[in-house]
Image: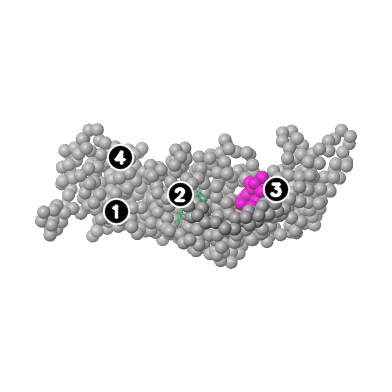
Amino acid sequence: MSDMSMTSFDNARPANAQDLAGQPNMKAIDNARDPIGIILEIAGSGSQIALDVQRLAECAADADPSVALAGQVGSQIKVRVGSGWLLASVRNQKQDSKTPGGIRAAIDFLGEGDEERLTGRIHGFRRGVTSYPTPGSLVYPATSEDLRQIYASDGRSAIQIGKVYPTKDIRASLYIDAMLGKHFALLGSTGTGKSTSAALILHRICQHAPEGHILMIDPHGEYGAAFRDSGVVLDVSNLQMPYWLMNFEEHCETLLTSSGADREMDADILAKCLLQARMKNRLAEQMGKITVDAPIPYLLSDLSAILQNEMGKLDKAGSTAPYVRIKSKVDELKADPRYQFMFSGMLVGDTMGEFLAKIFRLPAYGRPISIIDVSGVPSEITSTVVAVLSRLVFDFAIWSREEKTRPILLVCEEAHRYVPNEKNADGSSVGRILSRIAKEGRKYGISLGLITQRPSDLAEGVLSQCGTIIAMRLNNERDQAFVKAAMPEGARGFLDSIPALRNRECIICGEGVSIPIRATFDDLEEFKRPASEDPSFSHLWSMSGGEEEMVLRTVQRWRAQGR
Ligand SMILES: Nc1ncnc2c1ncn2[C@@H]1O[C@H](COP(=O)(O)OP(=O)(O)OP(=O)(O)O)[C@@H](O)[C@H]1O
Ligand SMILES: [Mg+2]
């Protein structure tokens, strides 16, 4: 430390008799009231402080875990300004070249509060800074009690999800309205606990809002087990999603097999014939003019018949190939048992109202979440199914605008599969609709929750539309860089700890929290966890019995293509 700063520390140290009482040979220090450094420089891009190494060593032995971490990267410090406190987080540390053994650190200001007269704690904390300290101002460790005041809910509806690091008992909460109002993203490398954390957050939201409306796309069939009691699980056996809900674009994705110039021709023919098929419905007659996108039931047999009929009208020069291609695809889907959840002959009735009520939980009957398990959906069509569901959320929100608004939360696991970046994009409709929801959904009361292990594979701009980012450990540097870019300035101090987080730990920043926090998720009861347990090789490989029957049953299911 420089001479100047040493003097100022010594002057600031309250060496009153009380501190020393009863400890004759020890210099008693109240670490919380003793400065650990001074402000060197205040700048827009980041302010610098000098830390006193000896004081840091004294603090490290403190019983209060927040004081013990004082000055470390990611820890919080406070600076006195007038009669109040400024709170800041430490972004980095480096050796001070000018003072041997001295440490310099960059800090980011998080907010300010008043001083509680008797205790010296921060109270009445608010985000943002109105007046900055001057160089030379003293820096103190933030205590657990300070953090308790800072993280105390400000009265807005909140759910508690875990505890604030490094404290022993301060609860970490998320403000529901702020978090859902501007979308959220849950990111983390594989195995860090994303799915379990997502289940925990959703469970807490469901408890808080038993009449909510949450739709979760579950590509691995993990979440059914977790929401048996508080949700409705829909998979290929009971989803019953009528094919005629698809718009024209989605029809093209499922029914057209050609590419290039042929595809355009096929699409024109499909548009014409599909419209005719829809027009045959009684509903269409009542409405007069309809579009090919209108979700009006039609019969697959009508579509086939119309295709056949149109083919008959061709003159000699016309090619029948497009008609044959589409017609044989329709027949194929009708006959394939794997597609029965969508293309069954049972799905011709007008069940649109019931279907929407079922998937959007209208009414919720105390089960506010519907889990759509798409793991049994044939992979060629999964992305179209997700597109249809997401578009239904969006269109429903648009067409129900004149009603009392019922916001809907759409949660998408493995989001990088459905909203991929340009490099991985295949131009499918699901990417477009989810990007659109990310951009415009908020205006229509749709909240998007994206869960992914590959944030760098997400479409550009989607992550920055997420107002709240919950980042668990990310091992990949590219992913880290992406998350950094999407996080607000004040969270930079925490960012560097992302690769060092333990499982179940996360950094949360943005709208859902008052200031960025590092938190550890609560232990989630076993029956509420998604079925994503890692298999125990050592246990399972020490058991035997029933293998032959198991293989036979598997082969049978495989052949029947049912589950
Ligand atoms: N809050 C928690 N309470 C109890 N167990 C947890 C918690 N968080 C994670 N786990 C355990 O950690 C393991 C991995 O968690 P999880 O499956 O949620 O990770 P993931 O990030 O979703 O992985 P993947 O990327 O492979 O889907 C699981 O066995 C889970 O039981
Ligand atoms: Mg998972």
Q: Nearer the viewer, mark 2 or mark 1?
A: 2
Q: Which residue is mark 4?
A: 93
Q: CA distance from mark 4 to mark 3?
A: 56 Å
User: Cβ–Cβ below 8 Å for labels 1 and 4?
Assistant: no
Q: Which residue is mark 2?
A: 192
* Label located before the other in sequence (2 or 1): 1
Q: Secondary structure at mark 1?
A: helix
Within 8 Å of ligand 1, the CB of disc 4? no
Q: Nearer the viewer, mark 3 or mark 2?
A: 2
Q: Dot 4, how many residues are within 10 Å of its Cα: few (below 14), some (14-19), or many (20+)?
A: some
- Rendered residue at 66%/45% (across/down): 380
Q: CA distance from mark 1 to mark 3?
A: 57 Å
Residue 65 - label: 1
Quadrant (top left/top right/bottom left/bottom right) for the C terminus: bottom right
Q: Which residue is mark 3?
A: 247
Q: Amino acid at mark 4?
A: Gln
Quadrant (top left/top right/bottom left/bottom right) for the N terminus: top left
Q: How is the image coloured?
A: one colour
Q: Dot 2, how many residues are within 10 Å of its Cα: few (below 14), some (14-19), or many (20+)?
A: many
Residue 412 - label: none
- Residue 81 at x, y = what percent? 27, 48
